Amino acid sequence: MSEILRKHREEVDDMCFRHPWFNLVYNWIIWALIIALGISCMAWAYDVRAERRAASLTATALAEYQAEQNAAETARMEELAAAQASETAVITREAEMIAKLYFGIDRFIEKYDYSEADLFTYARCVFNRVENEKYSDTLEDVINQADQWTGYFENNPILKGYYNTALKAVEEWHSESIKPVSNEYLWAELTPNGIYLKNDFHADGYAIRQRYPWR
């Protein structure tokens, strides 16, 4: 066996001797393989770094996006809270003015015992004027119009019972999607039998009258 290997080595050596470019080609092939392996390793390392960088950028972008969404949601909630607070303040102020209106008619016409339905009817007269183009479009301006509301004064007290009824009337007015009565009913008629709205101030005998609940 050793003799066969020896002869084979001699044949290879003889071939290399007879073909001098053999070693050169062989070395080129080896170096080419080494270089290719090095390039492959570098490419793999680059891909790994690129993937890690992409993952890092994706995580950062996701965090930034989430932060933007959180900030937008916080701003929206703050805006909503501010709007609700503003709306609550407006409703409270309007209910206070209507409560002063109630105090006026109940104190200056003590011979009449008006029910909650009468008070709702009286408040609707104010709301109808606010919605009618002939009058101001703010409840405060309508109520403060001179010589229009019996017993109303800005310094009238706000009694709890009147305020609660006024608050219900104002909230109902703001929340209604369908008007319960036309805003052409602009005048309130205070009678011993209750408060009525009418659509004509002068034609007492011919005016159409409405009362809460609307009929």
Image (tube, rainbow, N blue to C red):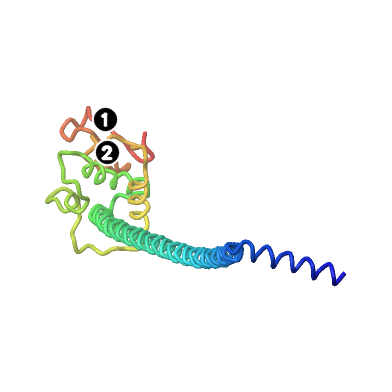
| Count of numbered tags | 2
Q: Position of residue 57 (x, y in %)?
A: 44, 64
- Disc 1 element: loop
The picture quadrant where one finds residue 79 is bottom left
Q: Position of residue 75 (x, y in %)?
A: 35, 62
- Within-10-Å neighbours for mark 1: few <14, some 14–19, many 20+: few
The picture quadrant where one finds residue 90 is bottom left
Quarter holding the N terminus? bottom right
Left or right position of 143 against 56: left
- Within-10-Å neighbours for mark 2: few <14, some 14–19, many 20+: many
Sequence-earlier tag: 1 or 2: 2
Residue located 32% across and 36% down the image: 181
Which amino acid is tagged 2?
Leu
Q: Is residue 73 above or below residue 202?
A: below
Which amino acid is tagged 1?
Ile
Q: Position of residue 67 (x, y in %)?
A: 41, 65
- Disc 2 element: strand
Marking on residue 208:
1
Left or right position of 92 against 33: left
